[in-house]
Image (cartoon, rainbow, N blue to C red):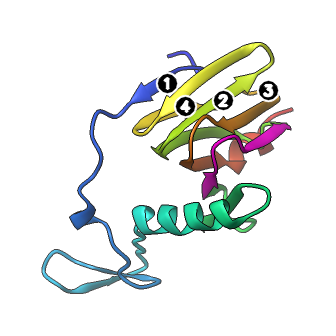
Amino acid sequence: MSRNKCYHAGHRPSSARLGWAGFGLLAGEDGSETEGMEKFSLEAIARAQATRAAASSSGRSSETVYGGHEHSLRQTVIALAAGASLHEHENPGEATIQVLSGRVRLTAGDVGWDGRSGDLLVVPDSRHALAAVEDAVVLLTVSMAARAGHS
């Protein structure tokens, strides 16, 4: 499979299945709670970040929803107002961008990939940039372990 492809999901999860169940606990199907699991509403986080991006002079806002320095996997919700961008930067590790809403353009050199709601873009292993064609929210997933394995 080529790393530089866009995959369209074709559907979005039902919002009835999404919701905040509390940090560290997830309500089970029977209403019980299960320790060690977390559940977040990406739709709610996306709305909040989009509101912050619209109010920001940079037109950007983000929140890491999972991971960080103590984990090898990091997932960050990034909102970009139309015309805003993440300027060209190095690839932090193996990464994907899932477009939660709106439209974006991922570029690496002279090559570009368009993504819209429901698409998954595989971030190239090179310098790249992300721009919002229209107001957009994406979920960036990065595997820091993949970067540590690079020589």
Q: Which residue is mark 2?
A: 106
| Label of residue 6 in the image | 1
Name the residue nearer the viewer: 92 or 135. 135
* Callout 1: SS: strand
Query: What amino acid does circle 2 point to?
Result: Leu
Query: What amino acid does circle 1 point to?
Result: Cys
Q: Which residue is mark 4?
A: 121
Mark 1–mark 4 CB contact (< 8 Å): yes
Vertical placement of 114 versus 83: above or below?
above
Mark 2–mark 4 CB contact (< 8 Å): yes
Query: What amino acid does circle 4 point to?
Result: Leu
Q: Which residues are magenta?
A: 76-88
Examine the image and state in which quarter residue 55 appears.
bottom right
* Callout 4: SS: strand
Q: Is the residue marked by circle 1 packed among few (<14), some (14-19), or many (20+) residues within 10 Å? A: many
| Label of residue 126 in the image | 3
